[in-house]
Image (cartoon, helix red, strand yellow):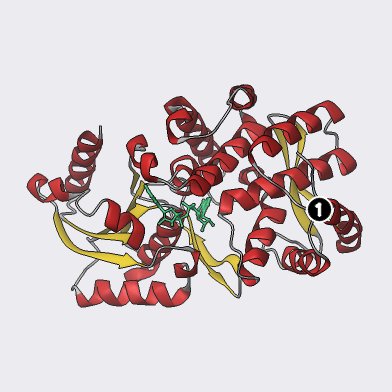
Amino acid sequence: MKESSIQQLAASLKREHCHQVVILTDSNVDSLYPDYFSSLESLGIEVLDKIVVAAGEESKNLNQVEEICARLLELGCDKSVCLLNFGGGMVSDLGGLSAAVFKRGVRYVNCPTTLISMVDAAIGGKTGVNLLHTKNVIGLICQPFMVMEPDADLLNTLPYQDLLSGFGEMIKYALIGVPTLFDELCSLESLGASSIKKSWIEVCAEFKRSVVSVDPNDTAYRHILNFGHTVGHAIEGARAIIGQPVPHGVAVAEGMLYEALLSRVFGSLSEVSLRRIQRLVLQHFEVKPMSDDMVDLVLELMERDKKNRDGDINFTMLKDIGVAQPDCCLDVQTCRRFFELAFREGFKS
Ligand SMILES: NC(=O)c1ccc[n+]([C@@H]2O[C@H](COP(=O)([O-])OP(=O)(O)OC[C@H]3O[C@@H](n4cnc5c(N)ncnc54)[C@H](O)[C@@H]3O)[C@@H](O)[C@H]2O)c1
């Protein structure tokens, strides 16, 4: 499977008269899979270099973009080069942005290695880096030349927390548009690489592709993908600030619990559906009450969220399991009153 998708990659590149790639990866992926693309050369694609960045969200910054572009320049790359992003969402967000700005844009390909990147991050062309602990503040939408077919064997080496992170995003897909997947995920007793069905990865990736094809520039409908992310991004940023980072999808899972509660209180989500969502999420994720300092920090970051408009905080709410309502706005005071209470209470599993 892996070799056939590398062959497909080589054939697609050659069709576009692209014969040179630079691989971008992170230190963990590189040490586990140093020769993953070794067959490319024999297929007529020259690998000019492999750029290895330190693993972890801290590498998603503007200095790193500059370093990648500087390396591409030193290598003498012109507009025909292709950047091959081999890694999780950190690598595809960082590499995508670097490719999009290098010489005003060169091609890039995403080869996802984490569950979250297979179902979400590698697809849809959102690229970006973080600034001042605020997620993806600098970025742009630029579609990849190709997203390679997920190689599920790569998940065997993924740490449990990162598998869990991807599982959080899978629950999101079930909640915003694939209710049959929700039922299947509820039947999962314990999470492991072998318990993730290939069909689940495919259905999430397909759903994301369908949403992106309707609204590639993220003007309205695509906002449904933000369910759980207004609170989730703020929790992710706050935990990074206090030196207790959590993986993206774990923060999103926590965010989904709060945003589902919000959908019950301010929207039309039924009590029965809310309980089912809470049961599934809390079966896999722990959501403890927050300290007062943490509540303040998370609220401050939510108020800085890039989706906010005219001072209001923007959420995607759920009407039901599988039905999302994008662009629901709440004023800051109402949000503060609701979330101060909810964050201090947390959820009991
Ligand atoms: N652009 C988008 O649409 C989009 C969507 C969702 C998330 N994201 C971004 O993606 C990032 C989170 O994604 P992620 O969890 O993939 O992050 P990541 O790339 O940091 O990977 C998580 C960890 O897994 C390691 N890893 C990767 N593949 C591995 C493998 N096969 N075996 C063992 N270890 C492996 C990495 O080295 C890292 O330590 C965040 O920055 C988030 O903002 C972007």
| Above or below 62: residue 126 | above
Q: Secondary structure at mark 1?
A: strand
**In this orientation, which residue lies closer to the viewer: 333 or 57?**
57
Q: Quarter holding the N terminus?
A: top left
Q: Position of residue 225 (x, y in %)?
A: 62, 44
Kind of residue sitting beneath label 1: Cys
**In this orientation, which residue lies closer to the viewer: 211 or 122?**
122
* Residue sitting at x 69%, y 46%: 286
Residue neighbourhood size for the residue with mark 1, other residues' Cα within 10 Å, grouped as few (<14), some (14–19), many (≥20): some
Left or right: 345, with 15 as reference point:
right
Residue 128 visible somewhere in the drawing: yes
- For disc 1, the marked residue is 329
| Above or below 324: residue 197 | above
Q: Position of residue 27 (x, y in %)?
A: 33, 62
* Residue sitting at x 75%, y 28%: 276
Please identify the quarter of the rendering in which residue 83 is found: bottom left
Left or right: 176, with 302 as reference point:
left
Q: How many marks?
A: 1
Q: Quarter holding the C terminus?
A: top right
Task: Determine if the C-beta at disc 1 is less than 8 A from ligand 1.
Answer: no
Residue 84 visible somewhere in the drawing: no
| Above or below 327: residue 239 | below
**In this orientation, which residue lies closer to the viewer: 105 or 65?**
65
Left or right: 274, with 3 as reference point:
right
Left or right: 258, with 235 as reference point:
right
* Residue sitting at x 49%, y 38%: 209
| Above or below 309: residue 36 | above
